Structures are given as structure tokens and as C-alpha cells.
Image: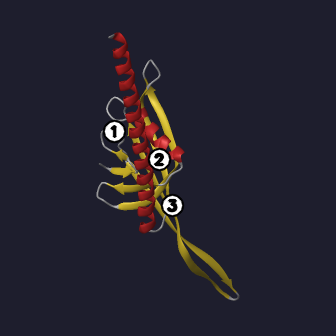
């Protein structure tokens, strides 16, 4: 695994990226002084942005499905943990933009080559905050899975009862 964003893994065989650009800034306020050079005061970290770019060849690597998953994650508006393959934890990031460039088309219009860029921006500054957000997402996911499982059990029970009633009617 090259990197994981939330539950989306960037793998060499599915969504490999060729470049990873990390830009971090720090904020300083300029204080003018009479007859002297201005002084600067550090006021904290600024923006922390990542840009992930790569090329997909749908016959070999991932394609529409991988990019659709990233688009759905972006549309959710949620922050996702970003961890690289070495175990480095970057923090919680939101997807701010996805760019796709399709080229070298088949007769049916499907692209043989898809260049993609995913722009991410960090939204937390404290690791404790990050783990709190992850646990909230896991709790929400657990509730959804539990609800879906309960619904499936209810449907299966209803279908079994209906089947039994049908069999009783035959005999």
C-alpha cells in the first residue's frame, strides 16, 4: 500500500500515484515600527495542503471505480485520516478538488489513459482531535452496518415466513 485516505487505499495495482506534493505554510504578522525595520510575529501554522497526481490505465490499473470512490468521499464533506505506507500519519484531510484528464479513447468512448489529481487540505492540528474524529466515523459506520444487518435479518425472516405460508397452502 502506498497510502490510505480514510478507507480508500492507494495501491500500485489500483490507484497508483506518481507525484506527491506537500505544501506547508506558517503565518507571521508584520508589525510596522517608526524609524526601524518591521518586526514579524509568528502566530501559528498556516495551510497544510497535499496534491496527489497519477496516471491510470484502466486495462492495467484502476479506473472509473477508483475515481468514483474518491468523488463520493469528497462529496461527503468529511475529513479523512491520511497515512502513508511507511506508517507516517499526516492528519485529517478533506478533499478540496479532483481533476481528471481522459485521453487515448477506445471506439466506445472509454479512455485508455486517465490522468488524475487529488487536492487535499488538512483540517486538524491535534492528533487527539484526529483520533476523536476517527472514532466518531467508526461509530457512525458501526451503526449503519448494524442497521443494515438488522434490516437484512428482518427481510430474510419475512421471506422465510412467506415461503412457509406458500408451502402450507400447497398441501
Residue 171, x across and y down, in percent: 32, 11
Q: Secondary structure at mark 3?
A: loop
Mark 3 lies on residue: 123
Instruction: Check the image and report above or below for 116 versus 49.
Output: above
Q: Give residue 115's position: percent from left, percent from top.
A: 44, 38
Labels 1 and 2: the sequence-earlier one: 1
Circles 1 and 2: CB atoms closer than 8 Å: no
Which sits in the foreground, 124 or 32?
Answer: 124
| Callout 1–callout 3 Cβ contact below 8 Å | no
Mark linked to residue 118: 2
- What residue appears at the point 37 percent right and 13 percent down from the top-left corner? 169
Q: Reading the chain from its start, which is encountered first: label 1 or label 3?
A: 1
Give the crowd class for mark 3: few <14, some 14-19, many >=20 residues within 10 Å: some
Image coordinates of residue 22 in percent, x first then y, are 44, 58
Circle 1 SS class: loop
Q: Residue at x 53, y 44 (%)?
A: 75
Which marked residue is nearer to the observer: mark 2 or mark 3?
3
Most distant residue in the bottom direction: 35
Callout 2: 10 Å neighbours few (<14), some, many (20+)? Answer: many
- Residue 74, given in percent of the width and then of the height, sits at 51, 46
Report how far apart the C-alphas of labels 1 and 3 lie in the structure: 27 Å
- State whether residue 102 is above or below residue 95: above
Task: For residue 63, say whether it is visible.
Answer: no
Is residue 36 at all visible to an observer of this figure? Answer: yes
Q: Nearer the viewer, residue 102 or 36?
A: 102
Mark on residue 14? 1
Q: Residue at x 40, y 28 (%)?
A: 158
Q: Quadrant of residue 43?
A: bottom right
Amino acid at each position: 500500500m502506498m497510502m490510505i485516505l480514510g478507507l480508500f487505499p492507494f495501491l500500485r495495482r489500483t490507484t497508483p500515484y506518481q507525484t506527491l506534493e506537500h505544501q506547508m505554510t506558517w503565518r507571521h504578522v508584520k508589525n510596522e515600527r517608526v524609524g526601524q525595520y518591521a518586526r514579524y510575529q509568528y502566530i501559528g501554522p498556516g495551510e497544510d495542503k497535499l496534491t496527489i497526481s497519477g496516471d491510470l490505465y484502466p486495462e492495467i490499473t484502476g479506473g472509473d471505480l477508483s475515481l468514483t470512490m474518491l468523488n463520493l468521499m469528497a462529496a461527503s464533506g468529511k475529513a479523512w485520516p491520511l497515512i502513508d505506507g511507511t506508517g507516517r500519519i499526516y492528519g485529517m484531510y478533506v478533499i478540496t478538488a479532483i481533476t481528471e484528464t481522459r485521453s487515448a479513447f477506445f471506439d466506445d468512448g472509454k479512455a485508455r489513459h486517465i490522468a488524475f489529481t487529488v487536492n487535499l487540505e488538512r483540517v486538524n492540528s491535534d492528533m487527539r482531535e484526529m483520533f476523536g474524529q476517527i472514532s466518531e466515523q467508526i461509530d457512525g459506520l458501526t451503526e449503519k452496518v448494524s442497521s443494515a444487518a438488522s434490516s437484512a435479518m428482518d427481510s430474510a425472516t419475512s421471506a422465510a415466513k412467506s415461503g412457509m405460508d406458500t408451502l402450507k397452502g400447497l398441501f
